[in-house]
Amino acid sequence: MLVHVVLHGEADPDDGAEFFHLATDSGAYVLEFLSVQRDRPDPATFLGRGKVAELAEQVSDLSVDLVLFDRVLSPVQERNLERALQCRVVDRVGLILDIFARRARTHEGKLQVELAQLTRLRTRLIRGWTHLERQRGGIGLRGPGETQLETDRRLIGERIRSLRGRLVKVAAHRATQRRARQRAPLPTVALVGYTNAGKSSLFNTLTESSSYAADHLFATLDPAIRRLQVAGHEAILLADTVGFLRDLPTDLIAAFRATLEEVNQAQLLLHVIDGSAPDRDAQIAAVDAVLKEIGADGIPRLLVLNKVDLTGDAPGNVYEGSGSLMAVRVSACSGAGMPELLQAMAQRVGRSMLRAELTLTPEEGALRARLHRMASIVEENFDELGMAHLIFDIDDLTWRRMRAQMRNSGCQAIDTPPTIPADG
Ligand SMILES: Nc1nc2c(ncn2[C@@H]2O[C@H](COP(=O)(O)OP(=O)(O)O)[C@@H](O)[C@H]2O)c(=O)[nH]1
Ligand SMILES: [Mg+2]
């Protein structure tokens, strides 16, 4: 059950649409969405007594597992509400942290999210809390913090101290990590933008519309990273990221930035914009400001104006007066504009591909393994002497490097016909 509270005299920019989106993004199955008007928050239960009783009845009638509040609740309010409703209650901060917990990929991001979860938990860990079974409604309990739920405050305090110490060290080593990241096997493109802009939808549509070759190397990657292939270009890794939010609670800002830390390793950012949002210019400015704060403002950016099916704009490229590409208009839902977007991405980051052939002796197993990792094998045959004949597509830069190494190490590999551009 979602409870959206509108306080008297406060603007309600979207009638709870963002909240609804966050809840479903986090995996909630929404049985009921309530919008409640109130003059001011009640210190004990946020809502008035009558309203709480009404909610309790609905919770029991609908067998609700979890009540999500689109507000920041104090520990006391949260506890009182849980008692009155006989059900877990998670506030806006808990919900956002849940999303961050699932999205944090870098070491620093995970540490920051865990720190934020535990700091909150410490103030909320009160005896009697366990009257609620913890398996009911997982939201707010997932992520690195969840294993700590049953431990006591002292242990949490120790863990928090240790996390802080580790974060200091991580920050000190960040420069080294950046260097290591530049050795990523494929160019990475990250989707950034306001929550609800359509990043995840675009992520799915793009990876489906490209000639995506499922392969084992990437099958084990994070579900928010996928490999995509544009004909004639080297594959690209596409990363979905956590969305930017309105009124992000201040104690979550560090966790939010750290969750986006991986954006810094991308070669290109696709800034996804909900072209139909009335406040889209404010959203664009907010995203730009955050990118600057996390030091990602130097990364090339391509604007993607999404939801053309709603705005009625024609899909495709939008050029500046000077003739350079400014944005691509698309619809993640209908797929309109995808070919243009894939092309624009590949042109900016994808290296061109070659088709090459090699014959390797049985002793050159290491090289063969390397080719299997770095190239996409088109054909492989072994003759009676154990010689492996390979035909493969590889990006031209990697191939030039490998050939130079092969030459230097006196490799026996025979390079049969000259390499030709691959047709993808
Ligand atoms: N009409 C329309 N709706 C879209 C489009 N792309 C995304 N949406 C909807 O916008 C909402 C947010 O999409 P999502 O991909 O989850 O946004 P994210 O928060 O940026 O990841 C969902 O309800 C989508 O169905 C589009 O091209 N057209
Ligand atoms: Mg998303």
Image: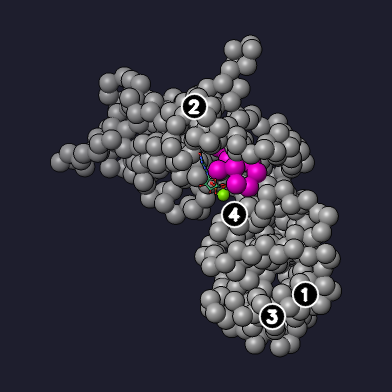
Judged by depth in the image, the label closer to the viewer, 2 or 3, is: 3
Question: Which residue, given by chain and number where applicable, does mark 4 sit on?
Answer: 21
Which residue is located at x 43 percent, y 37 percent? 334
Question: Which residue, given by chain and number where applicable, does mark 1 sit on?
Answer: 48
Q: From mark 4 to mark 3, how far is it between C-alphas?
A: 27 Å
Closer to the N terminus: mark 4 or mark 3? 4
Query: Which amino acid, mark 2?
Result: Pro
Numbered circle sitting on residue 10: none
Which residue is located at x 57 percent, y 67 percent? 32
Residue 52 appears in view: yes
Is 351 located above or below residue 239 in the figure? Answer: above
Residues in magenta, as a range: 189-198
Query: Which amino acid, mark 4?
Result: His
Q: From mark 2 to mark 3, how far is it between C-alphas?
A: 50 Å
Magenta-span inclusion, residue 149: no
Numbered circle sitting on residue 315: 2
Q: Nearer the viewer, residue 248 or 377?
A: 248
Q: Secondary structure at mark 4?
A: helix
Closer to the N terminus: mark 2 or mark 1? 1
Q: Nearer the viewer, residue 337 or 371?
A: 337
Q: From mark 4 to mark 1, how far is it between C-alphas?
A: 26 Å
Question: Which residue, given by chain and number where applicable, does mark 3 sit on?
Answer: 53
Q: Is mark 4 within 8 Å of ligand 1?
A: yes
Query: Which amino acid, mark 1?
Result: Gly
Q: Secondary structure at mark 3?
A: helix
Looking at the rendering, which quadrant does residue 290 occupy?
top right
Q: Quadrant of the C terminus?
A: top left
Judged by depth in the image, the label closer to the viewer, 2 or 1, is: 1
Judged by depth in the image, the label closer to the viewer, 4 or 3, is: 3
Q: Is residue 132 left or right of residue 400?
A: right
Q: Are marks 2 and 3 in contact (CB under 8 Å)?
A: no
